[in-house]
Each structure stands twice: as structure tokens, then as C-alpha cells.
Image (tube, helix red, strand yellow):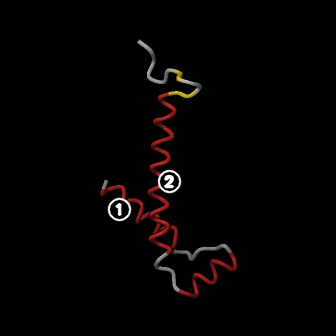
Amino acid sequence: MLPFSFATDGATVGGDLRRERGSDRMHVYAVAVDDAAQTLSADERQHLRATAEVPDWFMDDVERRYREIRKQR
């Protein structure tokens, strides 16, 4: 029997699964960021564009939304 992460065409099955999980997490984060961005005020959007800085509450909101999305799956 071959190990779970046996090589196939230069890639590994185990590596493919890790990349897939990582890709799924990034997708969920992207959705959470997009949802949180929809709640930015016009002034917050202007500040973000000018400084590349998000409001203090933004990352906490993204994390909250991320957890909610993950629970729904």
C-alpha cells in the first residue's frame, strides 16, 4: 500500500488536500471581507483608499463573519 501522500506527477495527494483546505479558508475569508466592506461608511471608504488602513473594528468584524460562515457549512 502506498502512503497517503504518495507522489503523482510531481504533486502529492496530501499536498493537494492541504491546498484545497487552504483555498477554502481563503474563499471564506474573501466572502467575510467583502461582506464587512459593504458596511463601511463613505468616510471610512475614503480613508481606506487614501491610507490603505481599515477602521479599528474592521478585522474583528471580518473574523466574526468568518466564524459565522464556517458554522453554516
Give the crowd class for mark 1: few <14, some 14-19, many >=20 residues within 10 Å.
few
Q: In this rendering, is residue 56 above or below 66? A: below
Say which of marks 2 and 1 sits in front: 2
Q: Earlier in the sequence, mark 2 or mark 1?
A: 2
Q: Whole-Å distance between the Cαs marked 2 and 1?
A: 15 Å
Find disc 1 in the rendering and name its residue: 68
Dot 2 corresponds to which residue? Answer: 26
* Residue 2 rendering spot, x and y as whole percentages: 44, 15
Query: What is the three-letter code of the residue carrying label 2?
Result: Met
Apparent side of residue 12 relative to residue 73 in the rendered image (left or right) = right
Q: Nearer the viewer, residue 43 or 19?
A: 19
Image x and y of residue 50, in percent = 69, 80
The quadrant of the picture occupied by the N terminus is top left
Badge 1 element: helix
- The residue depicted at 64 percent of the width and 73 percent of the height is 53
Which sits in the foreground, 53 or 38?
38
Q: Residue at x 47, y 77 (%)?
A: 38
